[in-house]
Image: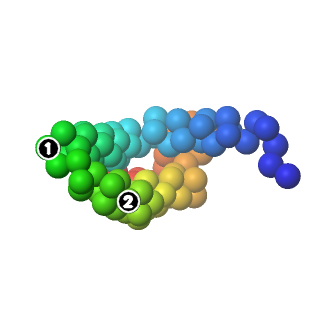
């Protein structure tokens, strides 16, 4: 059974990764914001395509996050609790 506090642990781990590698997090965040804004723009001018683009966004989103997953994996394997070490930095 999953404990109730697990999502808070995940959020803390995500914040820790973001503080160690903010550029990659900002890059991916801005990409997803642009995708959301483009979806809204398409909805305003061609609402018929919105469902298809939404489905594509939901299908491609996890694959686009692979870079974030890799950065998190590198940080988990090469960082101490306070500072990254060596040349294995994800940015």
Q: Residues within 10 Å of mark 2 (few under 14, many from 20)?
A: few
**Viewer-proximal residue, 23 or 9?**
9
Marks 1, 2: nearer the viewer: 1
Regarding mark 2 in the picture, which secondary structure is present there? helix
52 above or below 40? Answer: below
Report the residue marked by disc 2: 55
**Labels 1 and 2: the sequence-earlier one:** 1
> Mark number for residue 45?
1
How far apart are the two marked residues, 1 and 2, measured between alpha carbons?
18 Å
**Viewer-proximal residue, 90 or 53?**
53
Residue 9, how many percent across, how many down?
Answer: 68, 39
Q: Residues within 10 Å of mark 1 (few under 14, many from 20)?
A: few
**Viewer-proximal residue, 44 or 89?**
44
Regarding mark 1 in the picture, which secondary structure is present there? helix
Q: Residue at x 24, y 54 (%)?
A: 48
Q: Residue at x 73, y 42 (%)?
A: 6
Residue 65, how many percent across, how many down?
Answer: 41, 57
51 above or below 27? Answer: below
The residue most toward the left is: 45
């Amino acid at each position: 059974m999953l404990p109730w506090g697990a999502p808070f642990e995940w959020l803390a781990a995500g914040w820790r990764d973001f503080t160690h590698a903010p550029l990659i997090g900002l890059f991916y965040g801005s990409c997803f914001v642009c995708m959301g804004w483009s979806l809204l723009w398409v909805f305003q001018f061609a609402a018929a395509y919105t469902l298809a683009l939404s489905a594509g966004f939901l299908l491609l989103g996890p694959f686009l996050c692979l870079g974030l997953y890799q950065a998190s994996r590198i940080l988990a394997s090469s960082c101490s609790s306070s500072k990254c070490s060596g040349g294995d930095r994800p940015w």
